Amino acid sequence: MKDEILGLPEEEKRDLAALQDTARERQKQKFLEGFFIDVASIPGVGPARKAALRSFGIETAADVTRRSVKQVKGFGDHLTQAVIDWKASCERRFVFRPNEAVTPADRQAVMAKMTAKRHRLESALTVGATELQRFRLHAPARTMPLMEPLRQAAEKLAQAKADLSRC
């Protein structure tokens, strides 16, 4: 546990680096979540088909995958491709903003995760220390009943050795 606590700063650095590494995809995902199928103009996809997509959890460009659209009844290759093309047109509008790659909220989430982990580990250490203290206090009471039989066994062993040496 001590090593885990000491390793938290390095883990935080790794998590922040991972945020940086995934920044483009996360930004793009958030961008696509702003394009709603309900208001989109997709050839062959009217209100009824949009409702069908929505019933399958496909509400924004971010939700669109070939596989998910194909699962919707009434969407064959042609309509699926139309929805995929619409998503691609949305993606072409995306512009990555490196200066917004890791938001303060992203950093706060990592820091909150590390704080929670630190508290959990420190709590476990505190509980462990309390347990050790309790064992230390109760050890004499638990070992005392064993002392007399142990002393008697030691006497018998010494006597047996003495008897054996006389032979």
Image: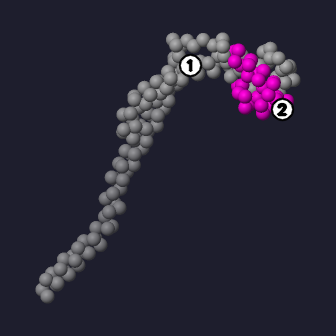
Residue 4 in view (yes/no): yes
Find residue 97 and report its image quarter.
top right
Q: Residues within 10 Å of mark 1 (few under 14, many from 20)?
A: some
Question: Is residue 87 one of those drawn in magenta?
Answer: yes
Q: Where does residue 68 sit, x and y in percent of width and height?
A: 74, 31
Position of 112 with respect to 69 (left or right) is: left
Position of 105 with respect to 9 (left or right) is: right
Up-down: is 165 above or below 126?
A: below
Q: Quadrant of the N terminus?
A: top left
Q: Where does residue 9 sit, x and y in percent of width and height?
A: 40, 28
What's the residue at 54%, 20% (across, down)? Answer: 23
Residue 59 in view (yes/no): no
Q: Amino acid at mark 2?
A: Lys
Decide which of 42, 58 is in the foreground and name it.
Answer: 42
Position of 89 with respect to 53 (left or right) is: left
Q: Where does residue 125 sit, x and y in percent of width and height?
A: 40, 41
Decide which of 101, 5 is in the foreground and name it.
Answer: 101
Task: Find numbered disc 2 in the image and state the secondary structure of the residue it sits on.
Answer: loop
Q: CA–CA distance between discs 1 and 2?
A: 33 Å
Find residue 149 and report its image quarter.
bottom left
Residue at the disc numbered 1 = 24
What's the residue at 36%, 38% (across, down)? Answer: 3
Up-down: is 151 above or below 165?
A: above
Residue at the disc numbered 2 = 73
Question: Is residue 100 one of those drawn in magenta?
Answer: no
Q: Residues within 10 Å of mark 2 (few under 14, many from 20)?
A: few
What's the residue at 54%, 23% (across, down)? Answer: 22
Residue range of the region highlighted in magenta in the rendering: 63-90
Task: Find numbered disc 1 in the image and state the secondary structure of the residue it sits on.
Answer: helix
